[in-house]
């Protein structure tokens, strides 16, 4: 494909930073990891020391549940149906029971009214992903009094009332996988304002150099990865601006054409434009996807029907009408920071205008 759907923004600065770490001889978790953790805290608006860098977003989710005491089938964890299966894996790996909830038709986030229907005395945690970077209404959900894990894997830079997502729940997790907002290749992080949770995450993260014994993990990030993360974070505001410019170009066309797309539900919710997802009839989506592919533009169905948690778990489809419909009526257009400087971007826009 001439134009990918997504691409990390990596330049000579990352290469220089990696070279420096490799030449230093200290390549495992060390000062760079600590530095990256603190710079993430600073960016989000947390005190130093309240971030724990990890090997990936999945290990962060797994640890977050463990820290909240989830460890038995009697523990129910609410999750949206329309989400990456990493979330489901983290629940099962803690021996808990997932309770799958349908999502909202406008922002694709876990639906508040449906959460209320599913809560009972076994409900221990609600995992709230901010889907494709659009903030979920974590403030209202928090009022239900159940511990919350915010899944910010796709939501670095998104805000509610000018406050970063990740600061609303009891624990938040991030992913720095190659396709995410900033990348360290693979990588993840837990943040929390609760120092006990942070200390627990740090304690479980590595097993070495401890006098006491209990089973611990090796979920560490390396200094090589962290050095890359530091560079990525430095330029992140600029990357966000570029994403926004691309999205606004797409919006112009959607407004002209009367095409619907995934949107935030409230004006005080600021999204990071991780994705731009069109919402149209199935036939239109499939035709558009084929035509864009033909001219060398890669666009994807962001979550296919078979990837819904209810499909993996062979649940009754009638309970998940909205997420079913979303999988059948959505198409994610290319959006990555460098696209704005790419002359081929105009090709996509012209093509869309001409339909
Ligand atoms: C919403 C969400 N949560 C968690 C993860 C897991 O992150 P990772 O791939 O770093 O394990 C992903 C994956 O990409 C994700 O999209």
Image: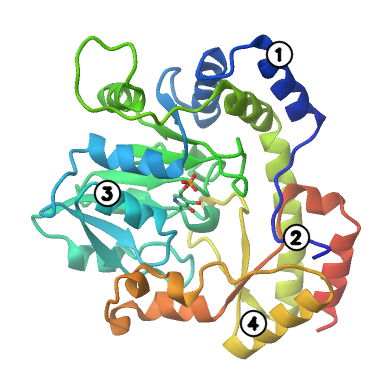
Residue named by callout 1: 23
Q: Earlier in the sequence, mark 2 or mark 4?
A: 2
Q: Is there CB contact under 8 Å for labels 3 and 1?
A: no
Q: In this image, 194 relative to 296: left or right?
A: left
Tell me the tag on residue 223.
Answer: none
The alpha-carbon separation of the residues under discs 2 and 1 comes to 33 Å
Residue named by callout 2: 4
Q: Select label 4 or label 1 by which is in front.
A: 1
Q: Earlier in the sequence, mark 3 or mark 2?
A: 2
Q: In this image, 266 relative to 290: left or right?
A: left
Q: Is there CB contact under 8 Å for labels 2 and 1?
A: no
Within 10 Å of disc 2 (Cα), the crowding (few <14, some 14-19, many 20+) is: some
The alpha-carbon separation of the residues under discs 4 and 1 comes to 49 Å
The N terminus: image quadrant: bottom right
Q: Earlier in the sequence, mark 4 or mark 1?
A: 1
Q: Earlier in the sequence, mark 3 or mark 1?
A: 1
Q: Is residue 250 above or below residue 339?
A: below
The alpha-carbon separation of the residues under discs 3 and 2 comes to 34 Å
Tell me the tag on residue 285.
Answer: 4
Q: Select label 3 or label 2 by which is in front.
A: 3
Tell me if I can see residue 170 in this picture. Answer: no
Percent coordinates x, y for residue 295 in the rendering: 84, 75
The C terminus: image quadrant: bottom right
Q: Residue at x 73, y 67 (%)?
A: 298
Q: Is there CB contact under 8 Å for labels 2 and 4?
A: no
The alpha-carbon separation of the residues under discs 4 and 3 comes to 36 Å
SS category of the residue bearing label 3: helix
SS category of the residue bearing label 1: helix
Q: Earlier in the sequence, mark 2 or mark 1?
A: 2
Q: Is residue 145 above or below residue 276?
A: above
């Amino acid at each position: 494909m001439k134009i990918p759907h997504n691409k990390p923004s990596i330049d000579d600065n990352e290469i220089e930073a990696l070279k420096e770490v490799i030449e230093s001889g200290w390549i495992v978790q060390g000062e760079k990891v600590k530095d990256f953790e603190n710079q993430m805290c600073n960016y989000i608006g947390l005190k130093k020391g309240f971030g724990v860098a990890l090997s990936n977003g999945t290990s962060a989710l797994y640890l977050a549940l463990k820290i909240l005491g989830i460890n038995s089938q009697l523990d129910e964890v609410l999750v949206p149906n329309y989400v990456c299966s990493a979330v489901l894996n983290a629940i099962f790996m803690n021996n808990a029971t997932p309770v799958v909830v349908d999502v909202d038709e406008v922002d694709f986030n876990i639906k508040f009214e449906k959460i209320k229907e599913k809560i009972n005395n076994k409900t221990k945690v609600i995992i709230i992903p901010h889907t494709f970077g659009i903030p979920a209404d974590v403030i209202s959900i928090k009022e239900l009094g159940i511990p919350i894990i915010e899944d910010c894997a796709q939501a670095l830079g998104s805000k509610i009332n000018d406050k970063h997502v990740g600061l609303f729940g009891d624990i938040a997790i991030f992913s720095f996988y190659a396709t995410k907002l900033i990348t360290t290749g693979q990588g993840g992080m837990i943040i929390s304002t609760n120092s006990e949770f942070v200390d627990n995450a740090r304690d479980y993260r590595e097993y070495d150099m401890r006098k006491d014994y209990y089973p611990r993990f090796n979920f560490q990030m390396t200094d090589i990865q962290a050095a890359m993360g530091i560079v990525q974070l430095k330029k992140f505001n600029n990357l966000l601006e570029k994403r926004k410019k691309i999205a606004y170009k797409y919006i112009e066309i959607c407004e002209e054409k009367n095409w619907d797309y995934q949107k935030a539900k409230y004006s005080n919710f600021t999204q990071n434009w991780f994705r731009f997802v069109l919402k149209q009839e199935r036939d239109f989506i499939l035709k558009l996807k084929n035509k864009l592919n033909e001219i060398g533009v890669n666009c994807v169905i962001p979550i296919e029907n078979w990837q819904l948690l209810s499909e993996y778990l062979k649940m009754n489809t009638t309970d998940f009408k909205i997420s079913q419909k979303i999988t059948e009526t959505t198409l994610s257009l290319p959006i990555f920071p460098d696209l704005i400087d790419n002359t081929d971007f105009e090709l996509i826009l012209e093509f869309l205008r001409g339909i």
